[in-house]
Image (spheres, rainbow, N blue to C red):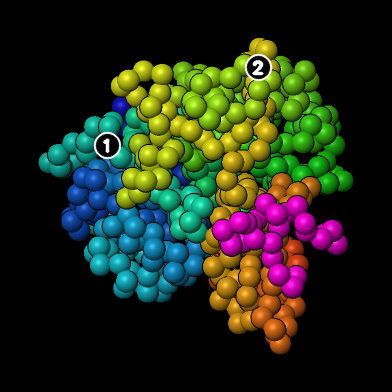
Amino acid sequence: MRVEGFLHGSAARFPDKTAIVCGERRIAYRELAAGARGLAAQLRRRGVARGDRVVILLENSPETVIALFGALEAGAVFSVVNPGTKLDKLAYILNNCGARAVITEPRLAAMAAEAAKSAPSVAFTLVTPFAFAAEDGQQDDAPPAGIDLDLAMIVYTSGSTGFPKGVMMTHQNVVAAASSITSYLESAPEDVVLSVLPLAFDYGLYQALMCAKVGATLVLEKSFTYPAVLLEKLKSERITGLPLVPTIAAVLLQMKDLVPGAFPALRYITNTAAALPPAHIARLQELFPATRIFSMYGLTECKRCTYLPPEQLAARPGSVGIAIPGTEAYVVDDAGRRVAAGVVGELVIRGAHVMKGYWGDPQATEHALKPGPFPWEKVLHTGDLFKADEEGFLYFVGRKDDIIKSRGEKVAPKEVENVLYELRGVREAAVIGVPDPLLGMAVKAVLALEPGFSLTAREVIRHCQQRLEEFMVPKHVEFRDALPKSHNGKISRSQVAMTQAALP
């Protein structure tokens, strides 16, 4: 099965059912499918062929969903990019994946055009709203889009080098992940899922994909800027599913007008990105007593790794659970041997949901995908440290690399450091993550300045705000005379973290 089959199947079964609610707009499955067919025809007519990459630079909207399904219907590979992405990073992505087309919106059209100037592969840009010709979307003689082993999407995620890596997922990968997750969530056509997560974030993207798969309704918000709106939507739309990250959960728990039992229709809450503190889980369960809470762990390279069955929450509040259905998750030592219960090692994931590799980066691919238990396969080494209890439930211990997870997004220290070094007077820079009750981890910049130069924390933050996405901007800034180095003379982030000054 290919991913566009999710939409066509639901459109055939529930043509007049609401597929997407976004603001005042309500889009039926029939309309969504027709839009995808129309866009596919337009892309084909303009030369997009099987396997070509289409970059989608849009905020959360029905057009984003139409764009991704339209690209798939044309046989292309889509990549949804955060609309907050800066010019240089967008240009890098366009060049890295060899994008054939860009789909964007009027307010971002100028930036997209500028980025495309330095990406020779980009043949054209489409700007919403889509304008379809009369024949668009009609049955034509176009060949089949492809098979399930074709690439479906490339999801860009921060890498330790400071450049984002393109995670390659086939149709088979996406179908396997969506099928597994919807099985343990018991997703159904009657579900109404509220998502404030960016569609550029794979957790947000899969809300659209899984709703289309089962014929559910997706209530799509552009952001979590106004928490009160979320509560109003929960009630007015009779929401049954609510995907959260710890940042959103922390804000909800601070809302004084949230009372226990106010949302009896809410069937489940999911959490991923970072583990919820046990105290937050307990408080959420008090406020939503009839709601099943799923604590989960995942990473872009396989979408979802583990989930904790809600009936285990009270007994194992610190666990991220067991492998999702149809997959395996286990802990190994440095030699790749499985370790005993209680022993800390690296988490390994085995299953049809594991990525095919990083686009154009065989070295990084080889580092992540290594030989598995059988000679015909590769398994995913997550780079995260875990341990398991005697019954096989897994517990996150820490990260082997320096990637910071803040607001549910991955932040590569090197990428932020590169921007810090652009500031005149910065001699040495190190970026680390520090615990934060709201963000999970907050980004902190530690700087040493050249003699005779002075900078304030406000100036540093303002500079970063002009060059980086919001979630990458340091919350804290510390100045030192010099930064600690390793034996080979490199700045040691671990030593910086151990010797940092107390936060204000």
Q: Is residue 492 magenta?
A: yes
Q: Residue at x 54, y 68 (%)?
A: 418
- Left or right of 484 in this view: 16: left
Of callouts 1 and 2, the N-terminal one? 1
Q: Residue at point 58% right, 61% down? A: 490
Q: Which residue matches tag 2? A: 341
Residue reaching furthest top? 391
Using the image as rendered, state which of residue 427 and residue 269 is in the foreground.
427
Disc 1 and disc 2: Cα gap in Å? 38 Å
Q: Nearer the viewer, mark 1 or mark 2?
A: 2
Instruction: Please tell me whether mark 2 sits on a helix, a strand or a loop.
Output: loop
Residue under label 1: 150
Q: Which residues are magenta?
A: 479-504
Tell me which amino acid carries mark 1.
Asp
Q: Quadrant of residue 358?
A: top left
Is 435 on the left or on the right of 259, as rendered? left
In the displayed structure image, the side of residue 314 where residue 113 appears, left or right: left
Q: Position of residue 99 (x, y in %)?
A: 30, 57
